[in-house]
Image: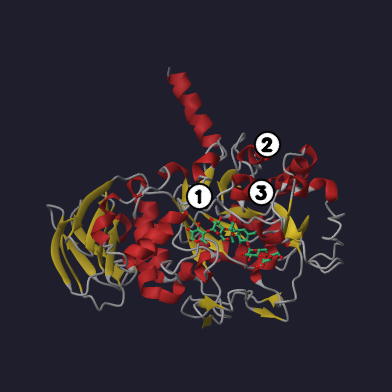
Amino acid sequence: MKFFLLLSAIAFCWAQYTPHTNPGGTSIVHLFEWRWADIALECERYLAPNGFGGVQVSPPSENAIINNPPRPWWERYQPISYKLCTRSGNEDEFKDMVTRCNNVGVRIYADAVINHMCGSGVSAGTNSTCGSYFNPGSKDFPAVPYSHWDFNDGKCKTGSGDIENYTDPYQVRDCRLVSLLDLALEKDYVRSKIAEYLNHLIDIGVAGFRIDASKHMWPGDVKAILDKLHNLNTSWFPEGSKAFIYQEVIDMGGEPIKGSEYFGNGHVTEFKYGAKLGTVLRKWNGEKMSYLKNWGEDWGFMPSDKAVVFVDNHDNQRGSGAGGASILTFWDSRLYKMGVGFMLAHPYGFTRVMSSFHWPRYFENGKDVNAWVGPPNNDGEIKEVTINPDTTCGNDWVCEHRWRQIKNMVAFRNVVDGQPFTNWWDNGSNQVAFGRGDKGFIVFNNDDWSLFVTLQTGLPAGTYCDVISGDKSDSNCTGIKIYVSSDGKANFSISNSAEDPFIAIHADSKL
Ligand code: AAO
């Protein structure tokens, strides 16, 4: 019996459901469009020391260069080949990043674009990030190589060849997503080429993959590819470890395709999470924070152990994908920090923090006409992420993950990892609080009046530093101090006009 338990524990640890982050690294950050050289530095100088578990990197595969509009961020979702050669860097730089991040205990997850190649309307030629020739008209990608045999068009039944109706699962899987040439994933040849690409990344040392556009692939085809994958590189991972898989499926509940169809392959993105949290914090549709008492599966979300959660992602922060006006982003920084703080304090899901770049957001008829704008660049070359004396980023990189409130909540999540959700309190409106066992406690005031309350924190007696208004450094606290008495209770006061109307304390912020 003991042996069986041990075996099943090992099997669980080695399966594709484990992110392989080090203990004390429970969140990952999406360093959207960063150069590999900057990510390597960030792992060493910031992510490892601050308890980040890993990084989701932008697609590393060669892509079409789009000039109209000029170098949009989304060109990276139009692969030309599986050469590791993009605006973020070449193969050597990718390897250097993976090695250096792994060496300091920070994992790399690659965004894998395997559903399709470039758009059907892109001109043939060598205008690609590694100069590989391609011809979308004849469906020729000799650098893989793929030819017209390797695409789905014969199977698609729509007039345009594109997905026209999301209520038809056949269209969604067999037709082109926004005209992107759809690979025939039932073919063993195509599966093998994709597996070869992913195995190349695994051998270099990545810990897993975000599988882009998973909704547009049959779950069985994804599985057939995953079955061909190598185990992770034993320089950093235990023998027999499998890549962590999280599949991008937008399931808001209104379409026949369900995220749950993909659970057999790994985790799935939970897009309802950010949309709902935004609605609650904005107090739209009569929502209030007190309703968050049963946040999680009771809200119609997938099981926590399958969910990858985030407040915003690179699509919906600019109104695409499952974008909706409720999504909180760095543009609404005060509410955004509360949203990310809530996510990181709450036990539900595997958490991903977004790290963005600025763009000249400009709305015309409710639509952001600059949503296409690519990363900070000089004539197309991505700019370095510079670091200001106050630790924030320069060159138009937003670096939400370096905001004190967010950085400190990443640490909070590490400290409370495995602790139960406890000591919920609310005022029936938008003042709420909860704890994580005897390790952490957080209080929010999103009402239009101040909060003064004595609450049971569940924490041992002592003086704690609020990690939202400041930092603990040695035995000092640059923020508010909270005094927990021997019965576990503490007084909290949060003005509704506070810069950040929430307070968080945890075992490691005890003075
Ligand atoms: C670009 C151009 C296109 C051009 C194409 C080819 O913009 O005009 O035709 O090149 O030349 C990114 C960009 C695309 C870009 C593409 C390739 O976002 O604009 O196209 O690169 O360069 C669907 C997919 C989902 C996808 C999302 C954007 O299901 O997989 O669209 N996300 C990923 C990436 C994304 C990337 C791709 C996939 C492609 O994260 O960055 O595209 O590799 C409904 C469906 C969703 C669907 C959305 C949007 O959502 O449910 O599945 O997402 O529609 O079409 C409410 C509903 C929600 C609904 C939503 C929007 O929220 O609750 O269900 O409204 O209507």
Give the quadrant of ligand 1. Answer: bottom right
Above-or-below relation of 425 to 467? above
Q: Residue furthest front?
A: 159
Q: Quadrant of the C terminus?
A: bottom left
Q: Amino acid at mark 3?
A: Gly
Q: Quick check: is the Cβ at mark 1 less than 8 Å away from ligand 1?
A: yes
The CA distance from mark 3 to mark 1 is 37 Å
Q: Secondary structure at mark 1?
A: loop
Dot 3: element: loop
- Where is residue 409 drawn, in percent x and y? 38, 61
Which is nearer the eye, 276 or 295? 276
The reply, left or right, for residue 51 in relation to residue 320 is left
- Number of marks drawn: 3
Q: Earlier in the sequence, mark 1 or mark 2?
A: 2
The residue type indicated by label 2 comes to Ala
When the figure is inspected, residue 82 is found, relative to residue 452, above or below; the finding is: above
Marks 1 & 2, CB-CB < 8 Å contact? no
Snapshot quadrant of residue 381: bottom right
Tell me the amino acid under the disc marked 1: Glu
Specify the label residue 32 is tagged with: none
Image position of 387 with respect to 508: above or below = below
The residue mark sitting in front, 2 or 3, is: 2
Residue at the spot of label 1 = 255
Q: Residue at x 60, y 49 (%)?
A: 214
Q: CA distance from mark 2 to mark 3?
A: 22 Å
Q: Quadrant of residue 196?
A: top right
Tell me the tag on residue 205.
Answer: 3
Sequence-wise first label, 2 or 3 = 3
* Label at residue 224: 2
Q: Secondary structure at mark 2?
A: helix
Question: Residue 347: x and y, percent?
Answer: 36, 49
